[in-house]
Image (spheres, rainbow, N blue to C red):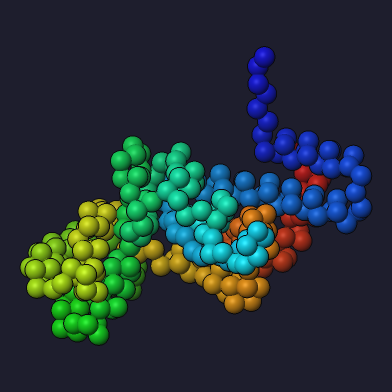
């Protein structure tokens, strides 16, 4: 028998029809319908973001109650940002930070992916159609953390990175196009990276591998190919800072609501964070947008 594949919109229509036939209170039905409508908007948003030619990805902690152990566990909420439009999508898969979740999110993606040095992203280096870019902010942070341990050498490392950021700041101040920015990067940034690489090789022999500075040097050296690719494309950012800003509401949430009650709540939180985060990135008031769209959604003709 031929399997019938339903679109997201058709699935919503079918689910809404089923809800109407359930024996529930009006409030219970409204809650289910609200979830279904949010899920539809989330799925559309996800498709839109993953069709972008350039995305950024990161992950953060979200506390979720373990009802068997009666305490909160530190789960993981992923975030993907469309670096072109600023749209954001949060993703929760039973709290896992495993490599397979990164594969679930970006397995079918083709384009530019910017990320930090987490090993889960290494798998995309070998995938056809994906170009992986690194984050210089993470490298800089490693050297900042090692300042108290060896201020002189840590400052030397920071000076190389400072030169890279100066190229970006100058390009921003001058309003350079992507093509012009790329030319400046090839002229100034890439030679600086080559000097940085040589400095790492010379300096690593002078420090303990397990020291903070040793770990900063090893981290930077292992990611240099990924960190260097941005010089060949003026559209790519030097770091992942914009997605870290987008993921900041999770940190605020940990201080305010403290935790999610279960996996289902964390999954719903991912959907709501996605819709609100995308509204804010577009300069739209989330409440006004939600009220407008959700009031019209039942009457849309798919």
Q: Residue furthest top?
A: 1
Closest to the observer: 83 or 29?
29
Residue 273 is drawn in which quadrant?
Answer: bottom right
Can residue 87 be seen here? no
| Residue pictured at 84% horizontal, 42% vertical | 19
| Residue pictured at 22% horizontal, 73% vertical | 211
Give the tally of numbered discs: 0
- Residue 154 at what x, y percent from top left? 20, 78
- Residue 10 at what x, y percent from top left? 73, 35
Q: Quadrant of the C terminus?
A: top right
Q: Residue furthest front?
A: 69
Left or right: residue 139 compared with residue 115: left
Left or right: residue 2 compared with residue 216: right
Closest to the observer: 243 or 289?
243
Closest to the observer: 83 or 59?
59
- Residue 89 at what x, y percent from top left? 55, 55
Residue 18 is drawn in which quadrant?
Answer: top right
- Residue 236 at what x, y percent from top left? 34, 57
| Residue pictured at 81% horizontal, 55% vertical | 31
| Residue pictured at 72% horizontal, 36% vertical | 11
Can residue 111 be seen here? yes
Q: Quadrant of the N terminus?
A: top right
């Amino acid at each position: 028998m031929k399997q019938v594949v339903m679109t997201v919109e058709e699935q919503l229509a079918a689910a809404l029809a089923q809800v109407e036939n359930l024996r529930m209170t009006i409030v219970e039905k409204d809650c289910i319908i609200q979830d279904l409508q949010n899920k539809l908007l989330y799925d559309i948003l996800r498709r839109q973001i993953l069709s972008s030619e350039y995305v950024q990805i990161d992950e953060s902690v979200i506390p979720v109650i373990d009802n068997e152990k009666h305490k909160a566990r530190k789960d993981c909420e992923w975030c993907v940002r469309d670096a072109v439009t600023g749209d954001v999508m949060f993703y929760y898969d039973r709290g896992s930070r495993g490599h397979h979740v990164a594969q679930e999110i970006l397995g079918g993606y083709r384009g530019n992916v910017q990320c930090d040095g987490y090993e889960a992203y290494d798998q995309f280096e070998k995938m056809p159609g994906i170009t992986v870019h690194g984050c210089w902010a993470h490298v800089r942070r490693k050297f900042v953390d090692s300042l108290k341990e060896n201020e002189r050498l840590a400052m030397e490392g920071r000076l190389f990175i400072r030169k890279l950021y100066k190229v970006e700041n100058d390009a921003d101040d001058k309003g350079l196009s992507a093509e012009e920015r790329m030319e400046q990067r090839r002229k100034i940034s890439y030679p600086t990276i080559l000097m940085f690489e040589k400095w790492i090789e010379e300096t690593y022999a002078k420090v303990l591998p397990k020291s903070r500075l040793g770990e900063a040097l090893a981290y930077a050296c292992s990611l240099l190919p990924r960190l260097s690719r941005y010089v060949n494309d003026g559209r790519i950012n030097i770091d992942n800072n914009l997605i870290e800003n987008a993921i900041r509401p999770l940190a605020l949430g940990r201080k305010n609501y403290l935790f999610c009650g279960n996996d289902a709540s964390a999954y719903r939180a991912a959907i709501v964070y996605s819709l609100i985060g995308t509204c804010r990135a577009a300069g739209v008031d989330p409440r006004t947008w939600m009220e407008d769209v959700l009031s019209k959604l039942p009457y849309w003709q798919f």
